[in-house]
Image (tube, rainbow, N blue to C red):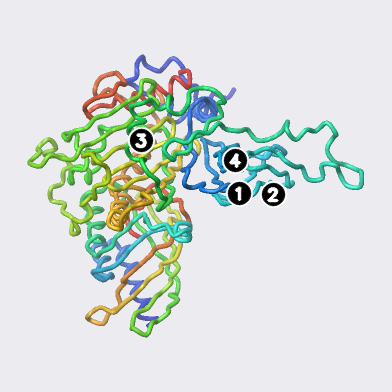
């Protein structure tokens, strides 16, 4: 008899949110359940930016977990989305990342769809010379790819397969919604798109995003140049359902700060030859240096000084994921401000002075836990709750992630 | 001119591949632009880069950050360069287009084709008469980067 490769110890999750068993990052059955319960479940998923679809017929393809999705601007101007899967044999309907089209045609057998994903014609439906063709009772309107409910929030397009359930505003909650509105308060412009392939389970990346404890310890750049230190003002907001989080760091107070004395990340010997790189241009009417927002399961909005970006998490199997970066500016950026965004783009992305380390550290965990399915991570900084806090020396928003995840997964 | 610029390309790649990263900014003029982007971004005219430096000093900062600040696993590159396609200009400057392939070897021996693409270079002679890059746009064919881009391309 074959032994089961790995039996999920369903009763092995310790009570509370302060421990995370390592099998959740490694188990293929968990990953399958996540596809049905999370990615095809009742939550909202980031699809694209509204500015990427300015005109009728403009479309983008994107992913919700393993599901390929087409997002388009329909004839009535509404943004719609549907699964990128032909009703006939299941082939991708749309093969490009984006473009403009009157309708969509599957290349395999030329079945056609309108911009909303409605099946509009079947090639040789009536056969040829009175022979062949589809049966008379075949109805176009009974077939088609699954359609998504869509919502546009501050120029962000979200979608869900759940035809009822909370609206996007309720899903995110009022406090974090304000944090999104703070950044996306006027028309944005895409200034770059890159993909970073990370060698880790997708949840390790989302935890890293929500982990306010690590930022100034892992990232020398943050600490040395006082972009974010735990001793600077700021805090973390976590929605009641754990779905959304926002962390903020206020500008540093001038003067000595010895709270990182002796730590690797406070490298006072490290000076920039071109210090203009850190001369952020005033962008928002406040003193917030850095703000990171996340919405479960896979959306992130980043403001690090003048570096603005949207990040989208797409799992690719148990131990791999794609992180899609869309770098943003505002359409009305002054030349000075745009120049600073381009320079401070060096902080983020696959080559970012800060973000490259987040790209590596998930892999360090994935490799470290390869033989530790019976063990668990400790997530106990700042206590055991998942509430908002006036400090970032806490793992409250990581616990919030698990609160949302466990509610969806029924674990 | 072809041999001089091919030699410059070779010397620049050698500095990176052999770990002499501090020598790398010296192949650029003080006022320069170095950008790593992708074919898709380049064709769409998107301005941002994975790495974006508008001075030799910023290139130096990239190297000192790699040496003193950033955390990444030990790795090395091997550049394979094509023959530069050169267009000279009457003012003594030149533009060159050179294909590259970079194989990355990690500390455990794992090797991958990390990047392939083209260098779009603008060159000028410095005061000593040697060719230097005034602009190098690194256009990678793929938009997907494995784990991280630490060492410059």
Q: Is residue A158 left or right of residue B65?
A: right
Mark 4: few, some, or many residues within 10 Å (few <14, many ≥20)?
few
Q: Position of residue A62 (x, y in %)?
A: 52, 42
Q: Which of the two discs, 1 and 3, sits closer to the camera?
A: 3
Q: Nearer the viewer, residue A7 or A96?
A: A96
Give the CA separation, mark 1 to mark 4.
24 Å
Give the CA separation, mark 3 to mark 2.
40 Å
Give the CA separation, mark 1 to mark 3.
32 Å
Q: Earlier in the sequence, mark 1 or mark 3?
A: 1
Residue at 45% over, 74% down? B83
Q: Secondary structure at mark 4?
A: loop
Q: Nearer the viewer, residue B88 or B117?
A: B88
| Residues at circles 2 and 1 in contact by the CB criterion of under 8 Å | yes
Tell me the quadrant of the picture where the N terminus of chain A can be found: top right
2 and 4 marks on the same chain: yes
Q: Earlier in the sequence, mark 3 or mark 4?
A: 4
2 and 1 marks on the same chain: yes
- According to the picture, the residue beneath numbered tag 4 turns out to be A76
Tag of residue A95: 1
Tag of residue A180: 3
Q: Secondary structure at mark 2?
A: loop
- According to the picture, the residue beneath numbered tag 2 turns out to be A107
Where on the picture, by quarter, is residue A339? bottom left
Tell me the quadrant of the picture where the C terminus of chain A can be found: top left
Q: Which of the two discs, 2 and 4, sits closer to the camera?
A: 4
Q: Earlier in the sequence, mark 1 or mark 4?
A: 4
């Amino acid at each position: 008899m074959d032994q089961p490769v790995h039996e999920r110890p369903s009763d092995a999750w310790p009570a509370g949110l302060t421990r995370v068993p390592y099998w959740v990052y490694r188990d293929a059955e968990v990953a399958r359940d996540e596809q049905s319960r999370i990615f095809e479940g009742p939550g909202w998923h980031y699809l694209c930016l509204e500015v990427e679809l300015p005109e009728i017929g403009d479309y983008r393809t994107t992913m919700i977990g393993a599901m390929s999705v087409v997002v388009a601007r329909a004839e009535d101007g509404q943004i719609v989305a549907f699964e990128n899967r032909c009703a006939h044999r299941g082939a991708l309907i749309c093969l490009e990342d984006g473009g403009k089209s009157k309708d969509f045609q599957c290349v395999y057998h030329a079945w056609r769809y309108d911009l909303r994903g409605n099946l509009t014609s079947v090639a040789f439906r009536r056969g040829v010379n009175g022979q062949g063709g589809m049966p008379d009772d075949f109805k176009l309107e009974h077939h088609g790819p699954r359609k998504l409910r869509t919502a546009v929030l501050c120029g962000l397009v979200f979608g869900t397969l759940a035809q009822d359930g909370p609206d996007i505003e309720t899903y995110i909650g009022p406090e974090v919604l304000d944090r999104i509105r703070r950044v996306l308060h006027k028309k944005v412009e895409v200034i770059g798109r890159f993909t970073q392939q990370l060698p880790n389970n997708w949840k390790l990346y989302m935890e890293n995003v929500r982990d306010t404890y690590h930022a100034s310890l892992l990232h020398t750049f943050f600490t040395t140049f006082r972009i974010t230190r735990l001793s600077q003002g700021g805090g973390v907001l976590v929605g009641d359902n754990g779905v959304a989080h926002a962390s903020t760091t206020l500008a540093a107070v001038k003067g000595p700060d010895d709270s990182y004395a002796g730590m690797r990340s406070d490298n006072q010997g490290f000076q920039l030859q071109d210090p203009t790189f850190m001369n952020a241009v005033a962008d928002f009417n406040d003193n917030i240096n850095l703000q990171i927002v996340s919405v479960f399961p896979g959306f992130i909005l980043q403001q690090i000084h003048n570096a603005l970006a949207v990040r989208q998490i797409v799992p690719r199997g148990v131990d791999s994921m794609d992180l899609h970066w869309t770098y943003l500016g505002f359409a009305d950026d002054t030349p000075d401000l745009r120049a600073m965004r381009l320079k401070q783009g060096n902080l983020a992305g696959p080559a970012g002075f800060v973000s490259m380390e987040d790209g590596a550290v998930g892999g360090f965990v994935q490799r470290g836990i390869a033989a530790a399915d019976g063990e668990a991570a400790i997530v106990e900084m700042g206590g055991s709750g998942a509430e908002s806090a006036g400090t970032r020396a806490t793992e409250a928003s990581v616990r919030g992630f698990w609160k949302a995840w466990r509610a969806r997964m029924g674990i | 001119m072809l041999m001089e610029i091919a030699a410059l390309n070779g010397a620049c790649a050698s500095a990176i591949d052999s770990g002499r990263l501090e020598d790398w900014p010296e192949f650029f003029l003080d006022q320069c632009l170095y950008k790593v982007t992708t074919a898709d971004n380049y064709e769409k005219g998107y301005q941002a880069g994975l790495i974006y430096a508008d001075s030799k000093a910023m290139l130096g900062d990239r190297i000192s950050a790699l040496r003193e600040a950033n955390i990444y696993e030990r790795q090395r590159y091997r550049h394979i360069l094509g023959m530069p396609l050169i267009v000279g200009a009457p003012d003594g400057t030149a533009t060159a287009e050179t294909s590259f392939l970079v194989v990355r070897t990690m500390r455990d021996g794992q090797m991958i084709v990390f990047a392939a693409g083209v260098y779009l270079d603008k060159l000028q002679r410095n005061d000593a008469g040697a060719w230097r890059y005034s602009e190098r746009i690194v256009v990678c064919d793929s938009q997907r980067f494995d784990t991280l881009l630490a060492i410059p391309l």
